Amino acid sequence: MTFIEMLGPTAVPTLICLIVGFVLLVIEMFLPGIGLAGVSGVLALIAVVVMQLGWGNPRVALYVIAIALLIIILGLIWIIRSFQKGRLSKSFLVLHEQSDGTSVPEVATAKSELVGKSGIAVTILRPAGIAEIDGKRIDVTTAGEFIPKGSRVTVVQAQGMHILVNKSAE
């Protein structure tokens, strides 16, 4: 039994859809985003599977599914490897610089100096809100408790951009 005979009465449309589907998937691998080529390629491969399940040989449908998955997996592996070590790793698409520490180090050190200082809740803290400490309005957070507006608060912890306050005894 030859390959054409194995495809059954839908041999020519099956071959056309199969070739067009794989070509469109390969084209999609080189285009950014999920576009018309990828969707059309997948639809063409689905058409091959439907034609073979309905009028051809179900074994061919399974072969098409297996080959399509294999090509997609190999393509993804190739792209990921290229991003890590290949040509794409040297392109402008991959960010090579890295940042250590906070994005605004001056602000982080200024916030840590607030620990132990007291102020007044300008808004209701439920649990986040605004407090005035040392004459500055600052975004603060409580440990989960609600603190009414106008209450006295004390800074317990300052970590990065997060300032934790507790209600202080008045």
Image (tube, rainbow, N blue to C red):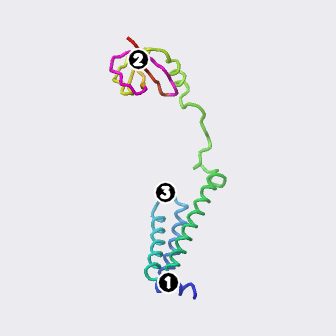
Q: Nearer the viewer, residue 89 or 142?
A: 142
Mark before the other along the chain sequence, 3 or 2: 3
Name the residue tied to disc 1: 11
Q: 10 Å neighbourhood of mark 1: few (<14), some, or many (≥20)?
A: some
Distance Cα–Cα, label 2 vs label 1? 79 Å
Give the side of residue 99 with respect to residue 117, left or right: right
Secondary structure of the residue carrying numbered label 3: loop
Name the residue tied to disc 2: 153
* Kind of residue at disc 2: Val
Callout 3 touching callout 2 (CB < 8 Å): no
What span is in magenta? 143-160
* Kind of residue at disc 3: Gly
Secondary structure of the residue carrying numbered label 1: helix
Image quarter hosting the N terminus: bottom right
Q: Percent position (x, y) of residue 24?
A: 51, 68
| Furthest-right residue in this view | 85
Query: What residue is drawn where x is 42% and y is 22%?
Result: 138
Mark before the other along the chain sequence, 3 or 1: 1
Q: Nearer the viewer, residue 165 or 122?
A: 165
Q: Percent position (x, y) of residue 53?
A: 45, 78
Secondary structure of the residue carrying numbered label 2: strand
Tell me, for residue 33, which label it has, or none: 3
Seen in the picture, residue 10 relative to 142 is either above or below; the reply is below
